[in-house]
């Protein structure tokens, strides 16, 4: 056991992109692990309740009905159109908002496992994504009920579900890696992102239908969230494909992908010491 | 083949959230002579940047190795154990771990406090890559060994530290790992359970290729370890097990002699 007596600062190891990508892929292959973790934590949240996870669907349904009832009359569109518009918009917005707020604590909240099991860190990000998608699919049940009741939808829009959900999933993982890393180091980010999402809810055309001109029309175009919503809502609601929105969405997704890879690669080795 | 190879492995804990003044004070404290607690403070641009918790550890572990990490509090035992278990990425140096690792680091990490004992067995099993059926097969053995009985259906937050230790030790040893890492393992168990653990340790030692235990209690280490590493402020030093146990015996004898003298003095007065 040769140990020298002189102490000097050891040469720091830099993060590598290859290791980060390896981490992500080996995390992805451990799908059994992260889906089991996601189910476990979700079930735990509804422990000792009578109806369990149905609460997710019930609260969504009640919330939607109240909103359609209150805002539907003000929008100048038929109630059946607004019902689908709002439900679809809110469904997707919640997926995005859960991704952002869930991301900014994704490593911190899994501290107990990260510091006791030697596993790829990306598992916890995939777990968060899984958790969000389980919630999404549960809320889809009352949403389908609302669509059926209003009758205002294009069946061809269903075709867009798969590519859109894929985009959402990729974005969720990217945001998870990016915000997870940043918020592990700078804890303000957790509170900041929660606040931002609350503000974004009102600046995104979920509750309101964008007018032709005026500040709200600008907000609807400038805001990337509105394009993420449009790629699935418009085919379903109007039977059209928003090409411009797809362009924005793909651009944003690629940027996110690059940013998250860089951040994750640089800080992956330090995350555990920040928790 | 199951193995651990560590070459010049160092770990620096970044000092996040502590201010410069405290860091500099701490640096002075750790440089005082006779300090035993904690590693050296590392400066970067004249600001305290991190704590050198492990300083260039070199170690090769092969099947059949029973390694004892021995040293006072804050000497880097746990850090070394975690690096060897692949939890901490080394800040510098290179480490290669081949084999399935199972570990018991601390009573508060690696458990979900809100979940029941049974759910924690499941979670741990899942994270070790076991299938549900495999976990289900292990459950009776784990519950039986831990003697927790129906407490296994209560949330872990209701357990005493001794009960938590029972659960964690039972889980860690039930997964039949290639490499078992234990940190201050039986410190909170009662006498009866400690005896049971000692018995289980014998079977574990027979079945597990590599076992590494960190402890400040030399008696526990010298009885079975074939490699002893003494940790001192992040430095690791290999000790000869025979010499180590002889030295310990001598120390014990001396302590006994002192006590006998004291007793005699008391009786005389």
Image: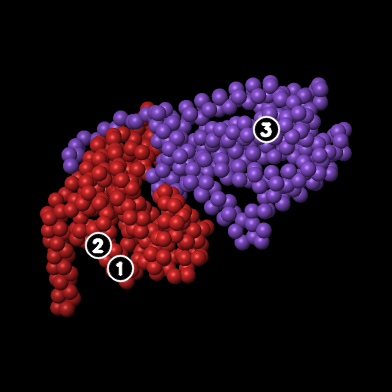
| Marks 3 and 2 belong to one chain | no
- The residue where tag 2 is placed is B202
Q: Colour of chain B?
A: red
Chain under callout 2 = B
Dot 3 and dot 2 residues touching (CB under 8 Å): no
| Marks 1 and 3 belong to one chain | no
Secondary structure beneath label 3: helix
Foreground residue among A201 and B167: B167
Dot 1 and dot 3 residues touching (CB under 8 Å): no
Q: Which residue does the image show at 17% across and 78% down from the upper left?
A: B267
x then y, percent, for residue B109: 43, 52
- The residue where tag 1 is placed is B196
Q: Is B184 positioned to the left or the right of B112 in the image?
A: left
Please report whichever mark, 2 or 1, sits nearer to the chain's N-terminal start. 1
Secondary structure beneath label 2: helix
Secondary structure beneath label 1: helix
Residue B56 picture quarter: top left
Foreground residue among B8 and B99: B99
- The residue where tag 3 is placed is A159
Q: Is A63 positioned to the left or the right of B13 in the image?
A: right
Q: Is B222 positioned to the left or the right of A178 in the image?
A: left
Chain for colour purple: A
Residue B194 picture quarter: bottom left
x then y, percent, for residue B21: 41, 38
Residue A79 picture quarter: top right
Q: CA distance from mark 1 to mark 3?
A: 61 Å
Q: Which residue does the image show at 66% across and 47% down from the upper left?
A: A138
Chain under callout 3 = A
């Amino acid at each position: 056991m040769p140990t020298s007596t002189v102490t000097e600062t050891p040469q720091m190891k830099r993060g590598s992109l290859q290791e980060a990508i390896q981490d992500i892929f080996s995390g992805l292959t451990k799908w059994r692990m992260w889906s089991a973790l996601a189910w476990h934590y979700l079930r735990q949240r509804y422990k000792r309740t009578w109806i369990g996870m149905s609460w997710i669907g019930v609260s969504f349904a009640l919330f939607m009905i109240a909103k359609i009832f209150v805002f539907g009359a003000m929008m100048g569109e038929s109630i059946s159109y607004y019902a689908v518009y709002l439900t679809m918009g809110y469904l997707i917005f919640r997926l995005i908002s859960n991704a952002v707020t869930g991301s900014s604590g994704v490593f911190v909240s899994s501290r107990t496992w990260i510091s006791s099991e030697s596993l790829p860190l990306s598992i916890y990000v995939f777990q968060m994504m899984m958790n969000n998608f389980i919630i999404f699919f549960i809320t889809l049940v009352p949403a389908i009920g609302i669509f059926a009741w209003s009758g205002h939808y294009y069946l061809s829009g269903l075709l867009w579900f798969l590519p859109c959900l894929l985009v959402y999933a990729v974005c969720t993982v990217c945001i998870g890696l990016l915000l997870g890393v940043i918020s592990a180091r700078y804890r303000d980010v957790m509170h900041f992102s929660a606040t931002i999402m609350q503000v974004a809810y009102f600046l995104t055309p979920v509750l309101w239908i964008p007018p032709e001109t005026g500040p709200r029309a600008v907000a609807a175009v400038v805001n990337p969230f509105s394009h993420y919503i449009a790629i699935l809502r418009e085919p379903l609601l109007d039977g059209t494909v928003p090409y411009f929105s797809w362009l924005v969405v793909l651009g944003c997704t690629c940027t996110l992908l690059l940013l998250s890879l860089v951040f994750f690669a640089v800080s992956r080795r330090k995350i555990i010491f920040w928790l | 083949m199951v193995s651990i190879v560590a070459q010049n492995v160092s770990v620096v804990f970044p000092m996040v959230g502590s201010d410069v003044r405290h860091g500099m004070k701490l640096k002075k404290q750790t440089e005082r002579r006779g300090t035993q607690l904690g590693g050296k403070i590392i400066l970067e641009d004249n600001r305290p940047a991190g704590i050198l918790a492990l300083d260039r550890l070199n170690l090769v572990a092969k099947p059949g190795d029973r390694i004892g990490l021995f040293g006072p509090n804050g000497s880097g035992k746990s850090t070394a154990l975690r690096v060897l278990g692949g939890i901490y990425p080394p800040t510098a140096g290179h480490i290669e771990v081949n084999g399935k690792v199972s570990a018991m680091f601390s009573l508060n990490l690696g458990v979900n406090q809100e979940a029941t004992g049974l759910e924690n067995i499941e979670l741990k099993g899942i994270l070790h890559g076991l299938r549900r059926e495999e976990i289900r097969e292990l459950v009776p053995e784990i519950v039986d060994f831990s003697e927790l009985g129906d407490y296994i259906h209560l949330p872990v937050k209701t357990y005493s530290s001794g009960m938590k230790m029972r659960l964690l030790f039972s889980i860690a040893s039930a997964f039949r790992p290639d490499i078992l890492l234990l940190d201050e393992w039986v410190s909170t168990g009662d006498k009866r359970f400690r005896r049971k653990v000692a018995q289980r340790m014998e079977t574990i030692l027979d079945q597990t290729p590599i076992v590494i235990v960190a402890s400040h209690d030399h008696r526990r280490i010298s009885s079975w370890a074939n490699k002893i590493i003494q940790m001192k402020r992040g430095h690791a030093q290999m000790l000869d097990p025979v010499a180590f146990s002889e030295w310990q015996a001598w120390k014990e004898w001396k302590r006994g002699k002192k006590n006998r003298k004291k007793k005699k003095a008391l009786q005389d007065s």
